[in-house]
Image: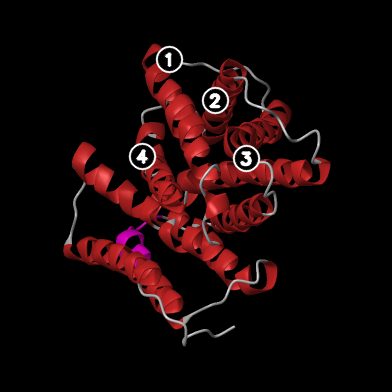
Amino acid sequence: MVKKSYVKYLLSVLIFGSNGIIASCIALNSYEIVLCRSALGGLALVLICLLTKGKMHFRDEPRQAIFVLISGMAMGGSWMFLYEAYSQVGVGVASLLYYCGPVIVMALSPLVFREKLTVPKIVGFLAVIIGVVLINGTDREEINPWGIFCGIMGAVLYALMLITNKKATKIVGLENSMLQVTSALLVVGVYVLIKQGFSMQIERGDWLPIIVLGVVNTGLGCYFYFSSIDYLPVQTVAVCGYIEPLAAVVFGAIILHESMDALKILGAVLILGGAMFAELYKTQKTELV
């Protein structure tokens, strides 16, 4: 089960790594993109649940259902802040701020989940963070306070999403993913309705990337993600989650022919090396907490 969860988790972060590329092909504002991906992703997961006739446990576990709903709402909020940060300060700076979320999760893991912090975990984590800085930190964009705030709030909500979801140990798999995305849709839908209403001008060429972003990157990606993290240590999720920005850079180089200079290549090596070191180096004598 653990090996299968690793595979599904890595697949999810690779899928999420292509979000920025697909979103760049859609001529909508950040909130409209998040609304479309949440709606299509939620619809896809609901249909799969109905077709597979999976048993629902949230009625029998109301307390855990609340955790999942809070997690989903935090996810919807984090998406809105992240996509707004993309438009305000650029992908590089926004990603650096957003990926402070796993740092928050790892710092709180000894208190919230009673997981031990070890020297290999910390060393690997620091290598990964340096790698992310090298990959994204060289991008030069105009900085403004609102964009910085959005990036930081995205990170805080990311941490809240992961922590609350890990508390729901009996609502897992497809049911968890469906509740997550539908509750995210509720938050995003209410915000967009208040801000501008549901009137959107969708060009014919936007439909294919919208469908891919919603059904594959949100529906399938969230299913892989939320059905795997319950079986993995939260520190593993925090460290290996940094493969997502690495995937974004690699996909950008392959698909959009973006440049991969020496610093980005070094950053990629540090991300992969740090994640592998943190996960593969096992020791019983390096516990810090």
What residue appears at the point 33 percent right and 66 percent down from the top-left corner? 276
Which residues fall within the magenta stretch?
132-141
Q: Classify mark 3: helix, strand or loop.
A: helix
Neighbour tally class for label 3: few under 14, some 14-19, many 20 plus, Cα within 10 Å:
many
Identify the image quadrant of the C terminus: bottom right
What residue appears at the point 54 percent right and 85 percent down from the top-left corner? 288
Mark 3, residue position: 76
Disc 1 marks a residue whose amino acid type is Glu
Q: Tell me which label, 4 or 1, sits earlier in the chain.
A: 4
Neighbour tally class for label 2: few under 14, some 14-19, many 20 plus, Cα within 10 Å:
many
Q: Any mark on residue 203, and which?
A: 1
Disc 3 marks a residue whose amino acid type is Gly
Left or right? Give the position of 87 relative to 172: left
Residue 130 placed where, x, y %?
36, 71
In the depicted structure, whether residue 197 falls above or below residue 90: above
Q: Tell me which label, 4 or 2, sits earlier in the chain.
A: 4
The image quarter in which residue 260 lies = bottom left
Spot the residue most to the top: 204
Separation of residues labelled 1 and 3 (CA atoms): 24 Å
Q: Tell me which label, 1 or 3, sits earlier in the chain.
A: 3
Task: Check if mark 4's residue and mark 2's residue have beta carbons within 8 Å.
Answer: no
Mark 2, residue position: 36
Mark 4, residue position: 18
What residue appears at the point 58 percent right and 51 percent down from the top-left corner? 230
Separation of residues labelled 3 and 2 (CA atoms): 12 Å
Residue 244 highlighted magenta (yes or no): no
In front of the other: label 4 or label 1? Answer: 4
Separation of residues labelled 4 and 1 (CA atoms): 21 Å
In front of the other: label 1 or label 3? Answer: 3
Left or right? Give the position of 18 relative to 100: left
